[in-house]
Image (spheres, coloured by chain):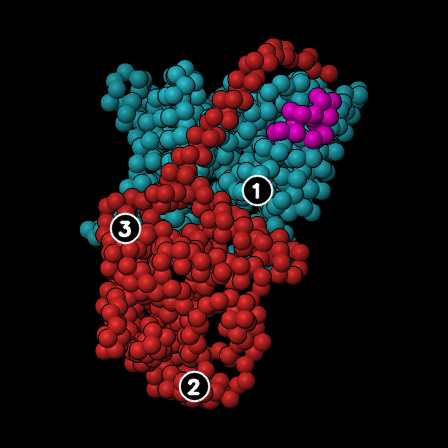
Amino acid sequence: MLFNSLHFLAFFPVAVGIYFLLAHRWRWAWLLLASYYFYMWWRPSYLVLLVAITVVDYAVGLALAGAKGPGARRALLVLSLLSNLGLLGFFKYFNFLSQALTDACGLVGFGYQAPLVDVILPVGLSFHTFQAMAYTVDVYRGLQTPERHLGYFAVYVAFFPQLVAGPIERAGHLLPQFHVPHRFEAARAADGLRLVLWGFFKKVVVADRLAVLVNEVYGQPEAFGGAQLLLATYFFTYQLYCDFSGYSDIAVGSARLMGFDLSQNFARPFAARSIAELWGRWHISLSTWFRDYVYIPLGGSRVGPGRHALNLMIVFLVSGLWHGANWTFVVWGALHGLFVVVPLLLRSLGLGGGDARRAPWRTGLSVLVTFHLFAFALIFFRAQSLGEALAVVRGIAGGLGSGPLLAGVTGFDGLELAIALVSIAVLELVQFAGARRSLGALVAARPLWTRWGFYYATLVVLLLFGKFDEREFIYFQF
Amino acid sequence: MPAPLPTPSSPGPAAVRGSWKRAALFVLGFAALLALLGRADPLTDVPVVGEKLAHFRQHVARYDTLFIGSSLVHRQVSPAVYDAELAARGLESCSFNFGVLGMVPPESYYLLERILDERPPRLRTVFLELSSLQLRVKREHTRRFDYWHSPRTTLDVVRAIRGAGWDRAVEAHQVLRHLEASLRKVFHCGQGPALLRTLIGPHDPAALGPDGDGWLSTEDDTSNRIELRRELGELEEEELGARLGALRASTGAARREGEVGLALLARTLARVRAAGATPILLVPPRHQVRSSLAAHVRERLDVEILEFDDPARYPELYAPELRFDLNHLNRDGAALFSRLLAQRFAELQGR
């Protein structure tokens, strides 16, 4: 089910209302039912995958608690990892690897055609497998007590606000919250609704508006000039941010309404002064997942500079592949790896670096350069193939041309461009204002008429300037 | 078992009551705001409808006769020719063509009510194309589909669908699509750019046709769709004569309007009469086997119906050289039809 659909508009009040009407001991069952219904709206048969992940990791968690020797514990962990990664591998990477094998065989003159499977990637599979795997790894490491209540564990895996696109929650943070009875609190509900409203603004006013131009230009990049390609690339940078962080805001806000705290997933990423800093502000739940379960086990930074660089490259390449089974994502991950590793190596050689905080202009320049590096890498993220990505790069490098900015673009006129630019400006202003104190807290501290005026204005802007064609969230495909 | 987190202290009953009261007030305020926006909605972003309505608002005191219907009206009724023919018979008329491609009930009924909301002071006659209630969803997720889904029209449609005897799954699907459109209309979803355009720019005068009276003949429409249609029309030319011949030989098809459709039509006619005008139902010449719809409506409602879909009575309207394509008359055919229509109207007036 999409957050930006009428179905969700009907589903959510019912889900929340009944949740608060039920006694605490039945709430897990209601949440599970609602979450499975939410998931089944898309493809009911794939519910079996969600149930399989739940049962395997629940059983492994319990077995780990009873297992004595390290060998048995390791075997149980491997079982969990294999089942989760096996599912992910089959649905997401089988065809990619098969095609790569076929291409490699072709390169050495061996005409082998590896088999392909005709399956649709289950929505959000990468998210809930990572969440479930984190649980078993934490239990294995002794950081998490195994959950004995299958119902609570099943809700942890399938909790509908964050089921299909995160934030990827750690068991230690989310699981205990299902044990606690939550009362309806008006202030908390208002806070959650504010966040939901802001998430919808990002999604339907900004992201879905920008998508119109981005889809058209990236749909046939060779038909457009450098100016249009550059504009589409900038717009895609904001589209992706607003689409994904909008989803996260709606997820966190919806959960908050029911009394749950989900992790913060974004923290003004375009204010970052380096790509390394940006990854501490962008998709934080995934960055920290890779940090805890890949980077640190590889040795992290407590190794020599060469190995440290290699660890970082591995993490970013895996992160690229996590996003999608396509060489474009591998290149995207590799570029980010290089953007992090190169400054690191330069600093270790005593070149470059320095304290960017010394002068404001240097900070501004760093922010600008970081944004452009990020946007450049996103060309590979958005393009359907490496050829298409290179066509975009060549088009931009070929110059901006002298024609009108929207030449050849249909369905996106000057007024739409103006609305898009104003909405981006509003987004940045609100984020800037909320940097020190959250926007919710700022609004909540105002008198009633100011608060209501703000809410009415936001609702009207959202309704009048939103795109309501139920466009999917980009990260659903991962 | 993890240690339970501390539970928040529960608010008192007065605080809870206060919260609910504030929430209810907020919702009421928002509903009032939506209603205000609804009054301001100029429908200017609905293709052709918007331009015609904007023109009509500007000249609301000018027109005494309106033609409302589908392309069979939009393409085939020339107000200038109609007015001139009446003038030759000593009748004064200033008419406007409110035809829009593909417009059938309930959309045409809704648009007519919006027109009457403008209280045109000189309005005397409204020609409304007779057509069955169209219930199946067309042009989903377009403004053209959404704009006529006022709560009342939507309820009417839902009632009609429930009584149509469709398969339950199809019925549910169709009802849902109409309810979604109604919600989009009530909440003004995505209407901001249209409102801004209304403030900053003039309307496209091309939609009003070369005479500025709402008539756009098939030849004068240069949109891609019509260019394509013209090519198709040329391809079909050889076939045209044969088809028209078959139409002349046909004896008609049984067709009745449902009870909900009749009730809506009766309500619309009453609204026209309440505005001080006379409604006349119009069956334009068309390439379809004659139906018994007009006879059925005449049985049930007290209203004048002018029928031009009988090739035996009006063979000149079915001459291949006056046809643009199978469905529409060309410019000369439209002029002829407009004269015939004026003559029939004059006869009704005893001229």
Q: Colour of chain A?
A: cyan
Residue drawn at x 54%, y 50% as measured from the top left: B155
Q: Position of residue A426 (x, y in %)?
A: 33, 31
To which residue does mark 1 refer?
Answer: A7
Compared to residue A49, the image places residue B75 above or below, namely below
Numbered circle sitting on residue A406: 3
Helix, strand or loop status at disc 3: loop
State the quadrant of the C terminus of chain B.
bottom left
| Tag 2 subunit | B
**Of discs 1 and 3, which sits in the foreground?**
1
**Of discs 3 and 2, which sits in the foreground?**
2
To which residue does mark 2 refer?
Answer: B313
The amino acid at mark 1 is: His
Residue A136, magenta (yes or no): no
- Quick one: label 1, few (<14), some, or many (20+) residues within 10 Å? some
**Circles 1, 3 touching at the beta carbon (< 8 Å):** no
Question: Can residue A321 be seen in the rendering of this structure?
Answer: no
| Apparent side of residue A251 relative to residue B148 in the rendered image (left or right) | right
| Tag 3 subunit | A
Residue drawn at x 71%, y 42% as measured from the top left: A48
Cα distance between the residues tagged 3 and 2: 55 Å
Q: Position of residue A159 (x, y in %)?
A: 63, 31
Numbered circle sitting on residue A52: none
Q: Colour of chain B?
A: red
Q: Which span is picked out in magenta?
A: A16-30
